[in-house]
Amino acid sequence: MSSNAAFPLMPRQFQGRWNKKSYHVLKELGRGANGAVYLVNQQGFTRAVKIGADSIDILMEVKMLKSVQQVNAIRVGPLLCDVDDMEINGKTYTYYAMEYLEGEQLDQYVRRMGAEWVPVLLIQLLARLEVLHRHGWVFGDLKPENVIVTHVEKQVRLIDFGGVTKLGNAVRQFTEEYDRAVWHAGDRRADVSYDLFSLAVIMVRLMSSGEEWKALRNEPRQTAHLCDIIRKNDSLYPYRIPLVKAFHVKYATAGGMKNDLLAALQERTVGSQNGQASGTAGRWIGGLFVASLLLLAGSLYYAWM
């Protein structure tokens, strides 16, 4: 989140006007375009509280979180815990409290664990996006900073829902690096393919070298340059079909991309086990096969079986 002086500093202690829940503010976690997020303690429970200057924006995020609270054991984002108003300096602000997710940003996790985990984590993420889309929402501002891998469950969860947009509307927030309009690959209308394009760019960035990605900054942003990286990168090349299809709006659902990415991962797993079982790649991909069953907890488990 970037600094934004439009939002008030929270008092150290506050109580909701209607639900009367009391909170002790521990620290500010960050500020974005439509709100500030704080780490709080609420009767012994650690929560995150988001407050915004525009109550309509906050309540739209609340509506979305309620609609996807938990679907078929797939947790899309943090669980919603409270929605209320509070008064600061004589002005009323709407806020919501949510589960505080302890974990690492997607890019930080990949740097620590290795790029081979990217397809596994993004298959998880596609399962979450599938739920979101089915309920009529597009995430919009999809980027590694808005995806967290939880410490305990090793599950991917979405955070910072300030860019969430109703299907068919103009995308409310975006980051240029992952925006298909900047890549001259479409407009900023909130549709399924907008999120899938961003996810494909994320995959290329996380699985390419820093030098490869930095080189793009000196070029006009075109998907052809992304395809060049995929073609030359041994790690990305096995996933070229779902990536190129996402760049060219060939998916109607996140589930379609998830299935193609999963098939490519399975094919690479089998090929590595048969051809390189005694090598380093064979060892990690064999471990990946087992670990992914545990890591994806439900949605991918049944797909593997």
Image: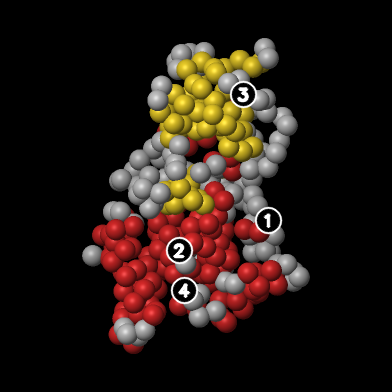
Q: Position of residue 17 (x, y in %)?
A: 52, 13
Q: Residue 201 is drawn in which quadrant?
A: bottom right
Q: Position of residue 259 (x, y in %)?
A: 37, 65
Instruction: Name the residue tied to disc 3.
Output: 10
Tell which tag, 1 or 3, sits nearer the viewer: 3
Residue at the disc numbered 4: 239
Q: CA distance from mark 4 to mark 1?
A: 24 Å
Q: Determine contact: label 4, label 2, CB under 8 Å.
A: no
Q: Earlier in the sequence, mark 1 or mark 3?
A: 3
**Which amino acid, mark 1?**
Glu
Examine the rendering and report whether any part of residue 257 can be seen: no
Q: CA distance from mark 4 to mark 2?
A: 20 Å
Residue 263 in the image, given as x and y percentages of width and height: 36, 71
Q: Which mark is residue 113?
A: 2
- Identified at 65% across, 52% down, the residue is 175
| 54 vs 218: above or below | above
Q: What secondary structure is found at the residue carrying circle 1?
A: helix
